[in-house]
Amino acid sequence: MAKLKDLLTARRGRRSTAALLLALVLAAGAGAAAWYAHDESHRRDVAVRQSLAAAPAAAQAIFSYDYRSFDASTSNARAFITGDFAAEYAKTTAALKSNAVAEQAIVRAEVSATGVVTASAQSVDLLLYVNQYRRNTNITGEKVDQNRVVLTMVPADGTWKVSHAVAL
């Protein structure tokens, strides 16, 4: 009878030890998951702040041009662009140049508001309200076009650059 009692006590001890080990493993897993979520949240917040800071200058450069210095305007904008969007921008501005020169077009873009659409540590989609002030030979005075644009910002070359743009 004593042996049976000792055997049951030993089994209870092993079960308690196993339960304690399982609880420790679960607690460590929960702690690791919480740390990862906090770290990812922090990296996302940094990405949002940095992309929001970079977006107005990028939008101004990309959506502005002056027929008198068209090549310099578009060259300046390329510093804010990365990836496939660089080729798309080059193609669009090449097609635009002859009309801009013929109409003596001057377009000055200003961002009036920004907001975050989606964000991760690697990519941020921003909604920008962009006013474009235009002058050309076809209009009297200055005309204001109010546009909404979603810019996808990604880290590249140590800063946040535009990898995609969609007008709404």
Image (tube, rainbow, N blue to C red):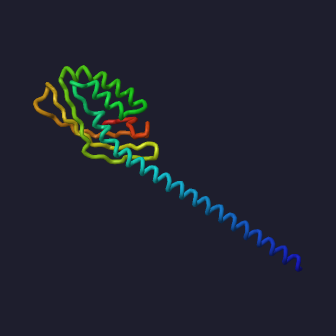
- For the question of whether residue 156 can be seen, the reply is no
Q: Quadrant of residue 135?
A: top left
Locate residue 149, reporting x and y percent. 31, 39
* Residue 68 position within the rendered picture, expressed as x and y whole percent measured from the top left: 21, 24
Residue lying at 39% horizontally and 31% vertically, measured from the top left = 85
Seen in the image, is 114 located left or right of residue 154?
A: left
Relative to 90, 108 lies left or right: left
Q: Residue at x 20, y 29 (%)?
A: 106
Q: Is residue 16 above or below residue 125?
A: below
Q: Is residue 78 visible?
A: yes
Above or below 6: residue 80: above
Using the image as rendered, state which of residue 136 and residue 155 is in the foreground.
155
Residue at 35%, 25% (x, y): give it.
90
Say which quadrant the C terminus sits in.
top left
Q: Please provide percent x and percent y for residue 26.
A: 63, 62
Residue 117 spot, x, y in % from top left? 37, 46
Q: Which image quadrant for residue 25?
A: bottom right
